[in-house]
Amino acid sequence: MHGSNSRASDRFDPQDFDRVLSSMCTRTHPEAAAMARRFMDDSPALPEVYETVVKLERRAVDLLGEVVGLDEPHGYVTTGGTEANIQAMRTARALGDTEAPNAVGSEALHFGFVKAADMLDVQLRLAPTDEDNRVDLTEVRRLADEDTVLVVGVAGTTEYGIVEPIPELGEIAASVDAQFHVDAAYGGFFLPATDHDWQFGHAPVDTMTIDPHKAGQAAIPAGGFLARDVEMLDALAVDTPYLERTSEATLTTTRSGAGPASTYAALEALWPDGYEAAYERERANAEWLADAFRERGYDVVDPELTIVAADVPNDVFERLSEKGWRILRTGEDELRVVCMPHVTREMLESFVADLDAVREETTGGAAA
Ligand SMILES: *Cc1c(COP(=O)(O)O)cnc(C)c1O
């Protein structure tokens, strides 16, 4: 018997979000959390058994369609952006007419595409980005050829939140008759409140990734895979040998109902006004922080959406980590802050106060 006053699992606490500055995930919206708990045992993989969660998923996909400008969306709630991107590449390979398929995008592509290309035996061709972290379109054009089955544009890159030129990339895809996929895993819930061209109504987009479990404020695991044509989903379907199921387009079989149910609840609660308000707040916070870094003499990559990167010296970075700030660096070693719903102005003020204290103690102060 265990002691009467504690269970072993009580000794473990989840990460407190109060100092999390470099994560694209955030606190789940309360209504989405409640729905995740209610439906976590229901698997949409068995529609004959778990009818309601399948209906919820359909509603969630329809609402996601509104977010991405697609009237009759086809798709499903994936485990995340990685699965959605794998599925986009699978569709493209299945529908492409070549023995030696390749996919073209920029160096800013999420590393999950490397896994997808590896599993699917598709050659991944990445065009370089310039000193402003922007894709070189001439290079994308050069890399695309008759064996290109997929061109990917990122609407909000993981490192800097940059929105790649989606209409131009779509034209390149069309010029080689390739599928055009937009990865809006991070940006998808911010972009409707901006002037960027990024979605199905703005360019000849075939498939899209959008992650409810990031700025959508749904529970993990919830990604979105959306397609313009049903053929693209059909291309993923395999015949299943069991029961009365005839085909299955998803990548995993057993799936948690928490993702679809919480995606539905988050969208009902927040789309569109709640997401717009959240974006305005997070964007203002990102600009405030960029100014704070700049005033202290650091080089800053200006936020295009809600990500700020600053060239903070290593010793300063280390001391901030020691103070409990959960911060990560970019590939260029910049300190990268992702302003998500849990990142409040107060939190950033407290972070900048710690930054000032640390600068007093370290040679990092010399940067100013
Ligand atoms: C986060 C992210 C992914 C991966 O999504 P997961 O949900 O972590 O699998 C893919 N692409 C972009 C642009 C991302 O920001």
Image: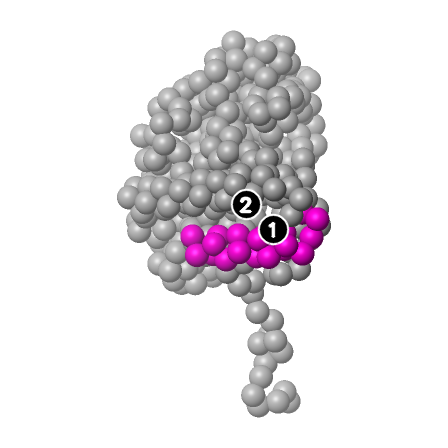
Give the residue displayed 60% in from the left and 71% down from the top: 12
Upstream in sequence: badge 1 or badge 2? 1
Q: Is residue 102 left or right of residue 276?
A: right
Give the residue displayed 60% in from the left and 30% down from the top: 109
- Pointers 1 and 2 in contact (C-beta within 8 Å): yes
Question: In the displayed image of the protein, which residue is found farthest to the left?
Answer: 273
Quadrant position of residue 106: top right
Q: Nearer the viewer, residue 188 or 330?
A: 330
**The disc labelled 1 sits on which kind of residue?**
Ile
Quadrant position of residue 112: top right
Tell me if residue 236 comes above or below residue 250 in the rendering.
above
Tell me if residue 328 comes above or below residue 201 in the rendering.
below
The label shown at residue 337 is 2
Give how far across and how far down residue 202 sits, in percent.
37, 22
Give how far across and how far down residue 24 sits, in percent.
52, 46
Q: Main secondary structure of the magenta part?
A: helix
Give how far across and how far down residue 132 sits, in percent.
58, 25
Q: Nearer the viewer, residue 192 or 331?
A: 331
The label shown at residue 327 is 1
Residue 218 visible from this viewpoint: no
Task: Please tell me how crowded label 2 is: few (under 14), some (14-19), or many (20+) other residues with Cα within 10 Å.
Answer: many
Tell me if residue 99 comes above or below residue 265 in the rendering.
above
